[in-house]
Image (tube, rainbow, N blue to C red):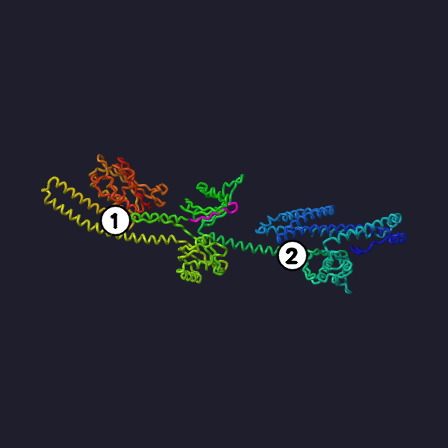
Amino acid sequence: MRLFDNLDKKKTGVLPYVLLLVLAIIVLFLISNASFQQNRALRQSTEMVTHTQEIINEINVLFGNYSGSQSAGIKYLISRDSTYLSSIIGFNDKSKFSFKRLKTLTADNPEQQRSLDRVTDFGDRLFKELKSLDPEIADKITKSVALTDKVRAIETHLDSLETLQSLMVATERDLLAKRRTAYESDMNFTPINILYLALFALGVLMFAFSKINSDRKKMGVTRGFLQNILDNTDNIVNYLVPLRNDQGEITDFKITYVNGQAKEITGRQTTDMLDKTVSEVYPFALRKGLIQLLIEVLRIGKTKTREINYQIDGNEKWFLSTFAPMEDGITATSIDITANKRAETDLKAFNDTLETQNLELERTGLFLQNMLGSIQYVISSFEAVRNREGNIVDFKIAYTNDKIVELTGRNAKEIEGKLISEEYPHLFENGEFEIFLKVIATGEFVEYEKEYNLQEGHFYFCNEVLKLGDGITIVSQNISLRKTAEKELEEATERLAVQNTILNDAETVAGLGSYSYNLDSDAMTCSDNCYRLLGIEQTENTFSLALLTSIVHTDDRDLFKRNIDLALQEKKNIRNVYRIKTLEGDLKDVMMEGHFFEKNGECFMVGILLDITKEVSNELTLQKHNRELERTNAELESFNRVVSHDLQEPLRKIQMFISRFSDTDKDNLSKRGHNYLEKIEGSANRMQLLIRNLLSYARLADEVDSIHTINLNRIFEKVLDDLSEKIEETNAKISIPELPSINGTEFQLEQLFNNLISNALKYKKHDEAPDITVTSEILPSHKIDESLNLSPSKYILLTVSDKGVGFEPDQSENIFRLFQRLHKKNAYEGTGLGLAICKKIVESHEGRIIAQSEPGKGTQILVYFPYTK
């Protein structure tokens, strides 16, 4: 007896049962009991099959909702259509209702109950992932690698659900087979049982009649219910019976039952498909080997599930088909999964797109990393750290490039993730933390210069701070060289002032811009500062090699083209200076540097454009002053010749005649004559000493001996030996400790300390012997008075102290000037050039000399020399 036979036929009337009753009376002893049992078994079998099929259909409905929700989620990710999100909620509600029905239908089956518990777990995970696809989160997900993980999670949950679906359907089909076996067992009563039951059935004949009639009605209702389920399911259900040839081989299958869903793919009515062959109704399936698959199912007697694509009316459609042997035929259940397959295809294409984008992001990241690693700036990114009230109390170092190792001695990986309060506590002390707070509060760009004492040395930086999210980005340029250059320029100005030349203060502003030129695509880009340097308005795709060529001065343009063409052909690094005329009409001198490298098969030239207009101008000014200095030196040399020859010659004659006059006629002079002669002789001697000192002062710059290490102990030994007579004459006490060595010129240092000791002996108190002390000390840079304007390094301080007459403190600078005397010329001998010569000697050794004194309390002469180990 076939399960689906006569489902579409009309119900039979009462007459067949009346005739059956008459016939049952005649053959009552033979078949009464058998007929009753068969009818009862048929009813129970029908109810069981109906129940099982209902469960199978409900399982398909439940898992169809899961599949539909997953498909809606994928469509949302692809199309960004938010209506698919409401579909997910609808599928969730339908799945809950279907789950409750399955719970009720399988209440008597513990195994199915356990499977449903697992379905609850995976279903909840699936909808949790799908519900998280709200528009805001999805926008972020689609721009990140996290989308791939989310899609994979959804697919994993759906695969687990499909596995449970197959398990539950297989369980129901096994249960159906067991019930079939039980039914057949019930049908095989022995003849003895039939005889005994027939005798009993005679007594209950009338009851049996009524019962049979009641069962007939119930069977009609059951069949109608089953038919309604099959007609309204999304599955295409067929029952196929094999057709055999004379040799017993299966050649085709006859359709003995088909539900209404088959009309969607065949275009035929149900009645037009019944009793037709598979080849007639489903010709498109023959090309996919459907007949062979059905034969295989019958042969092995096991259920098979396949995903099969068919070409129907020119369109490709996918079906998930399950073929299960039942009695002498096959139950074929198919569901259209075309939408799912298309979603999978779209998802794969989307994944490919994501992989391509991720690869491009990786390439861009590497390019940026290389740029940040090679740029001559320190670039850092700080993230704000807030307290419970939302106030910023610190910053976390999110990123810094490798240039930081040149300043702190530590690489970027050691610093990233730390707090600035741990790594850079000085930022809280020098006011920079407040600058960071202001930038985050206002969003305005801030630029400032700061001086730092870091682990790797002393630096000046120009910092640019801008807001980035809830943090800041800092670009720091090392301007220590510029600061040093400015300082050297100031020192050069001071040296020129000694030669009576005035050099106007020069303002130095370093202008720098970077560029990148792609030799393959002819595309050229540059930094924002490059636009400002060249006076070009910044718009998209403005900068190019042609534009740069056009603003080069016409006199330099041909040279510029030749140099660029040669560099591009030979891939040769360039460094040239050109004049440019900006679009604003300003003329600038610009140094262009460039070098070449290859990346991803493309060749680039990158470099900088440096505004050296002021440097060129300063160089021209310096050349002018050098020419003036050469002229001054020539005049000074002429003056030296006059002093050394023209002035000394008549002075020597005066001294010679005075000497002869004294030898021959001195005794003939009056007392007043003797006095006049002594004054003339004294004046001539002072004039000769003055000329010698002037020559000595003027020749200091020319008398440059080789610089070598000088032992100051030996210098002072020679000085004391030269002044021994004066020391004995004045009974002077001189204390000199062990002194260090310095780099210098020996004869100049002898003259320096000879002058200082001579002055200490000369300007003693009239009633006291001179008491002179020499001391030495090595001073670090931070202990040296900044007003001395010395370079930041160690110095040796030599102090010559006496207890002489002293002088007013406000004269401490005047005593080092030419011809400056604090006393009358008759009070103390001298020309007023001794300390001026000392100052010039010390400064030629890159040192400083100062004086400290008070009247009657003596004098201290402090001499600073650069320290050398």
In front: mark 1 or mark 2?
1
At which x and y percent is residue 763?
23, 38
Which residue occupies 20% across, 51% down? 645
Q: Is residue 173 left or right of residue 651?
A: right
Q: Is residue 206 visible?
A: yes
Q: Is residue 159 visible?
A: no
Which region is colored magenta? 467-478
Q: CA distance from mark 1 to mark 2?
A: 99 Å
User: Which one is nearer the viewer's eye here, 327 or 582?
Assistant: 582
At which x and y percent is residue 351?
59, 55
At which x and y percent is residue 820?
25, 42
Q: Mark 1 highlights which residue?
A: 698
Q: Is residue 599 left or right of residue 328?
A: left
Task: Name which residue type carries label 1.
Answer: Ala
Residue 376 falls inside the magenta stretch: no
Q: Mark 2 highlights which residue?
A: 342
